[in-house]
Image: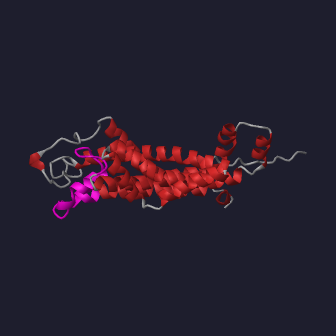
Amino acid sequence: MTTATNVRKKPAAWQRLLRNPSGFIGLIIIAVFVVVALLAAFGISPYPPAEQHVRDRLTGPSSSYLLGTDLFGRDLASRLMEGARNSLYVALLSVLLASVLGISLGLVAGYLGHWADNLIMRIMDVFFAFPALLLALLVITVLGAGLNNTVLAIGIVYTPIFARVARGPVLAVKEMEFVQAGRSLGANPLRLILKHILPNILAPLLVQISLALSWSLLTEAGLSFLGLGVQPPAASWGVMLSESRGIAERAPWLMFFPGAAIALGVLGFNLLGDGLRDVLDPKARGR
């Protein structure tokens, strides 16, 4: 007589993320914004974002203009879609730049230790001495305003965060037996870092990437609001807020919809970060 034992397979990380309320809601919000941005990228919007309808200036939401029009008669829904494209473009590329630079510096600092660690992290500490928006303003002042310079400025600002987040786990992982065994056998340091250390520190880095996307979205909006980020007539949620400052009482929808888009975007990435932390944190897995 045999006894059948049912071994239940542990769900994959993405399955656990979909079952996590925060992660699932965050993914839905981000997916909606990505779809909207893609539609704008392919020119699928109610009107061209820069097209002016002078006779319909400051028209409220209606059947002709779903979210109303701005001071120049431009369709707000179309500009909001174009703003999603530009805002997400800046957020994604700046975080990609920051993560590549920061993680690389953190890996080198943590693995080599000694003088290299001290040098790299002291430089990172100098960046940490400045508030993110102020540091971005300083970089933009040097580079000049514009979309690509905004990407570069925000990428530089958030590089130290990734360096610090990567360095901590590296210090622990490099002391583990499998890494020490590889070093004693003369394994190539780059191979050890990329094949054995990096995969074991991905969890906190993925969480940090999601959170950094929300910060970069806010930073881009702040820079564009001040006239140093995306430049008119191009649309950005920060630009749209800036353009509506003087007429907010007459046309409140001009501030409400871009502000709501920024808030939802930040909320979506933060919820995704919380969900990733719950899923990837070893202590949370057994709960």
Q: Is residue 242 magenta?
A: yes
Outermost residue, left direction? 55
Residue 50: percent from the left, percent from the top?
A: 20, 42
Relative to residue 194, is residue 226 depicted above or below?
below
Q: Nearer the viewer, residue 86 or 225?
A: 225
Quadrant in which the C terminus appears: bottom right
Residue, x 10% and y 46% (percent of image)?
A: 54
Residue segment shown in magenta: 228-257
Residue 135: percent from the left, percent from the top?
A: 40, 56
Residue, x 58% and y 52% (percent of image)?
A: 119
99 lies left or right of 169: left
Q: Is residue 57 magenta?
A: no
54 lies left or right of 78: left
Q: Nearer the viewer, residue 97 or 254?
A: 97
Residue 209 makes an appearance in the image: yes
Residue, x 31% and y 44% (percent of image)?
A: 146
Q: Nearer the viewer, residue 181 or 35?
A: 181
Residue 280 makes an appearance in the image: no
Q: How many marks?
A: 0
Residue 10: percent from the left, percent from the top?
A: 69, 49
Outermost residue, top direction? 42
Residue 79: percent from the left, percent from the top?
A: 26, 46
Residue, x 67% and y 45% (percent of image)?
A: 197
215 lies left or right of 223: right
Q: Nearer the viewer, residue 158 or 284?
A: 158
244 lies left or right of 42: left
Quadrant in which the N terminus appears: top right
